[in-house]
Image (cartoon, rainbow, N blue to C red):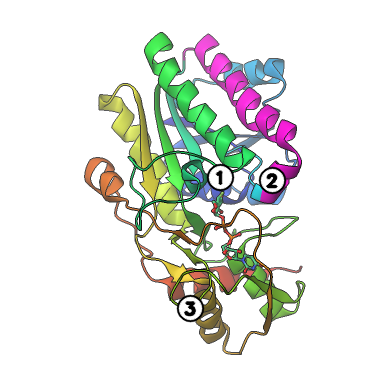
Amino acid sequence: MSVLICGGAGYIGSHMVRWLTERDHEVMVLDNLSTGHREAVQWGQLVEADLMDPASLDRVFARRNVDAVMHFCARSLVGESVAQPYAYYANNVTGTLNLLEAMRRHDVKRLVFSSTAAVFGNPVADVIDEEHPKTPINPYGASKLMVERILTDAAEAYGLRSVALRYFNAAGATSDACIGEAHACETHLIPNVLKSALGTGPALKLFGDDYATPDGTCVRDYVHVEDLAQAHLLAVDYLQDHPGAHAFNLGNGRGFSVREVIETAATVVGNSIDYEVAPRRTGDPAVLVASSSKAREQLGWTPAWTELGPIIESAWRWHQSQPW
Ligand code: UFG
């Protein structure tokens, strides 16, 4: 299969590139390198192009036949989306529309789209399944939900087949520490914990210990980046026999508190990890845990990384290998 990976120089996209290449698929990477890294594209062919430039998309699709597109390009920082909503709607919605138009012009009918738990907003259930109300509380989540709606309309109007995969907390790195999570502006918990353990990041802050959770800190569902890659490939196969627009939640179904993450990381690195308790971060729901029964049953998804320790260990090996 020939797959175009939009955003393949980024964190999840680069793991996808490797996953597909190892399984003998042909990969072409489209990335504008605004947040992605040239050195993360170690397999496949990198084409620098921008979703905001439709002519550049035509040049990409003209290069070779594409059987399916996986779309990872997005701005994805919740706080930034609140401060710069236009940038989020332009990049995440208009950019995706440009991609969809180009796919239509070049008769490409299968898409896997990176969606997010942020489409649900503040949860009203302990475990979030696909039927949970979708009331995003920030422009990032709203922009992703808009695209999900566009995909439903595109299925009806143009016969586009799509799967939206709603990631909970993506984490970890390849076992051989070849690629990992490298954001210029890091906001995520696990990399921040590991960078503070290495002494390469700022002092760790724990945002809020007064939530209505067992230890007062936020609870999240961490899912390994290679398990996300596995789900994308299964999703493309699923579209072979399933027309329409589909959505699946991806998580391990188990929540870990921020304190549990810090304690597990301390065991992994073999040292205690200092932190200070800071005020709550705006827009953080107390608990986000996925039900992924639908993905398991319908896609045949079986996450391999079900324990938090090995997920953090994989991230730690990669962090240690970096020059920083
Ligand atoms: N946290 C800290 N200190 C840090 C970083 C994070 O205490 O330095 C806390 C956060 O406040 C939160 C938890 O750790 O309680 C997890 O935070 P992350 O930033 O790692 O991840 P989020 O849960 O905020 O983000 C995830 C996805 C987003 C999605 C969001 C929806 O990564 O794509 O959930 O709320 F939008």
Q: Which mark is residue 36?
A: 2
Instruction: Identify the mark nearer the N-term, 2 or 1.
Output: 1
The quadrant of the image that shows the N terminus is top left
Q: Residue furthest left?
A: 297
Q: Amino acid at mark 1?
A: Gly
Query: Does 314 sit above or below residue 43?
Result: below
Asked if the residue under mark 1 is in contact with the one under mark 3, i.e. CB atoms within 8 Å, the reply is no
Q: Secondary structure at mark 3?
A: loop
Asked if the residue under mark 1 is in contact with the one under mark 2, i.e. CB atoms within 8 Å, the reply is yes
Q: Amino acid at mark 2?
A: Gly
Q: For the residue carrying disc 1, how many other residues have a C-alpha within 10 Å: few (<14), some (14-19), or many (20+)?
A: many
Foreground label between 3 and 1: 3
Q: Secondary structure at mark 1?
A: helix
Image quadrant in which you'd find residue 54: top right
Q: For the residue carrying disc 3, how many other residues have a C-alpha within 10 Å: few (<14), some (14-19), or many (20+)?
A: some
Dominant secondary-structure state across the stretch colored magenta: helix
Q: Does residue 88 belong to the magenta stretch?
A: yes
Instruction: Write the residue at 43% across / 76% down.
Output: 214
Instruction: Identify the mark nearer the N-term, 3 or 2.
Output: 2
> Splitting the image into four quadrants, where does ligand 1 fall?
bottom right
Task: Pick the residue in front: 242 or 76.
Answer: 76
Q: Does residue 324 belong to the magenta stretch?
A: no
Query: Does 49 sit above or below residue 301?
Result: above
Q: Position of residue 175 (x, y in %)?
A: 49, 66
User: Disc 1 marks which residue?
Assistant: 13
Q: Secondary structure at mark 2?
A: loop
Range drawn in magenta: 79-107
- Cα–Cα gap, marks 2 and 1: 9 Å
User: Disc 3 marks which residue?
Assistant: 215
Foreground label between 3 and 2: 3
Task: Pick the residue in front: 78 or 159.
Answer: 78
